Image (cartoon, helix red, strand yellow):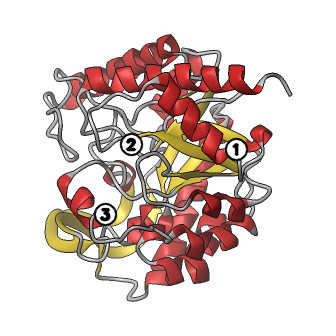
């Protein structure tokens, strides 16, 4: 009854990259690295299927970082002369590339991973891309001079790749926009419009993932400053409810998000985060089912999908796999509780 999927990233095997890091170094170069990336993708396709997930992703095995994995194929970006910049409203510092000229794609970005994914599973597949506002917040602009212009320029490129991914057989294309929870007014005023530009012309299912960040120290510490209620979603959900985007992915379990805010997404499919990516404690199926029960008070059952709170890239691989198994088992238990309908 309740379909299951992941938010996006999964832990990279130790033979591919450094483990437990958000920006890991690769363990190989050139053709050997490209082969290793695809091998890791095959591994996680199998593990997701074995865990019992319904919608399979590539786990972002080919990307060092969920944003920079796309940017590496964009002309007009200088990766050689990176600069340190505070991102997500200075929540943490990062070395970021600079936009130094008009943006254009060099060609396909994720063709190899998408075609591999489509060829090796009969289940529905999802592919993730960074959203335009989040990209803008993860680069240093030395050319456009305006965040909205820059976001729309990135949105056009994202749209080119998204249309190609659709042609590759991708069933769901998801744009990741953690910046929506940081710049709430801008997200509502122009972020959703940029997101819609990125999704323009798509006939497949479209989704947006809005979270409170990976389970790294900077994000965990930031959450501690947000008080007993996290109401950031309240500012952008109404705009998303009016948008053309089909699905919205959000944090739920172990968060301080008032669950009634999910009602603001009336008419949309809601990917409810039932797995905590900031803790190594593996949820029980009962805990997962209980979170689904809570969400069902505001989300019709036909619109509810069970998902992880966020990506799992920095996690221990065995812990991540156990959590995916709990996700599937908990969703199945919730289905048993609520019966067919």
Q: Nearer the viewer, mark 3 or mark 2?
A: 3
Query: Residue 332, position in %: x, y?
Result: 62, 20
Q: Which mark is residue 296?
A: 1
- Could you give the CA–CA distance between mark 3 and mark 2, rounded to whole angstroms? 16 Å
Is 18 drawn above or below residue 116 in the view shown?
Answer: below
Question: Considering the numbered disc 2 on the image, is that residue within a helix, a strand or a loop?
Answer: loop
Q: x, y (%) of residue 70?
A: 40, 51
Give the CA distance from mark 1 to mark 2: 23 Å
Q: Is residue 127 rendered to the left or right of residue 18?
A: right
Helix, strand or loop for disc 3: helix
Which residue in the rendered view is the most extreme toward the right? Answer: 341
Q: Earlier in the sequence, mark 1 or mark 3?
A: 3
Q: Residue at x 60, y 49 (%)?
A: 162
Numbered mark located on residue 2 in the image: none
Q: Is residue 336 above or below residue 151?
A: above
How far from the left and from the top, in percent, is residue 73? Answer: 38, 51
Residue 38 seen from this side:
no
Q: Residue at x 24, y 70 (%)?
A: 91
Q: Residue at x 58, y 57 (%)?
A: 259
The answer to whether mark 1 and mark 3 are in CB contact below 8 A is no
Of badges 1 and 2, nearer the viewer stands: 1
Dots 1, 2 in contact, CB < 8 A: no
Label 2: which residue? 311
Compare marks 3 and 2 and give the one earlier in the sequence. 3
Closer to viewer: mark 1 or mark 3 = 1
Give the residue number, with chain letter if any, for mark 3.
223
Where is residue 71, by image quadrant?
A: bottom left
């Amino acid at each position: 009854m309740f379909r299951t999927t992941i938010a996006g990233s999964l832990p990279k095997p130790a033979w591919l990259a450094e483990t437990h890091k958000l920006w890991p170094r690769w363990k190989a170069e050139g053709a050997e690295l490209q082969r290793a990336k695809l091998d890791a993708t095959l591994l996680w396709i199998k593990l997701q299927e074995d865990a019992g997930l319904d919608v399979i992703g590539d786990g972002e095995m080919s990307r060092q970082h969920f944003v920079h994995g796309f940017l590496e194929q964009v002309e007009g970006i200088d990766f050689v002369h990176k600069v340190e910049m505070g991102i997500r409203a200075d929540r943490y510092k990062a070395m970021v590339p600079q936009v130094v000229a008009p943006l254009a794609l060099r060609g396909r970005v994720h063709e190899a991973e998408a075609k591999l994914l489509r060829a090796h599973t009969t289940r529905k597949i999802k592919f993730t891309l960074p959203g335009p506002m989040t990209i803008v917040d993860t680069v240093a602009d030395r050319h456009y001079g305006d965040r909205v212009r820059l976001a729309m320029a990135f949105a056009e490129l994202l749209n080119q790749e998204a249309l190609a991914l659709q042609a590759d057989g991708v069933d769901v294309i998801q744009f990741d926009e953690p910046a929506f929870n940081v710049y709430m007014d801008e997200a509502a005023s122009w972020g959703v419009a940029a997101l819609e530009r990125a999704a323009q012309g798509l006939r497949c299912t479209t989704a947006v993932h809005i979270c409170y960040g990976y389970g790294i120290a900077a994000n965990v510490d930031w959450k501690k400053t947000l008080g007993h209620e996290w109401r950031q979603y309240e500012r952008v959900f109404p705009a998303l409810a009016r948008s053309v985007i089909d699905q919205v992915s959000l944090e739920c379990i172990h968060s301080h998000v008032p669950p009634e805010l999910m009602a603001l997404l009336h008419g949309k499919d809601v990917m409810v985060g039932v797995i905590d990516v900031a803790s190594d404690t593996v949820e029980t199926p009962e805990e997962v089912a209980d979170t689904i029960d809570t969400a069902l008070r505001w989300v019709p059952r036909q619109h509810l999908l069970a998902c992880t709170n966020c990506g799992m890239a920095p996690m221990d691989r065995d812990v991540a796999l156990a959590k995916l198994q709990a996700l599937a088992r908990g969703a199945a238990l919730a289905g048993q509780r609520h019966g067919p309908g």
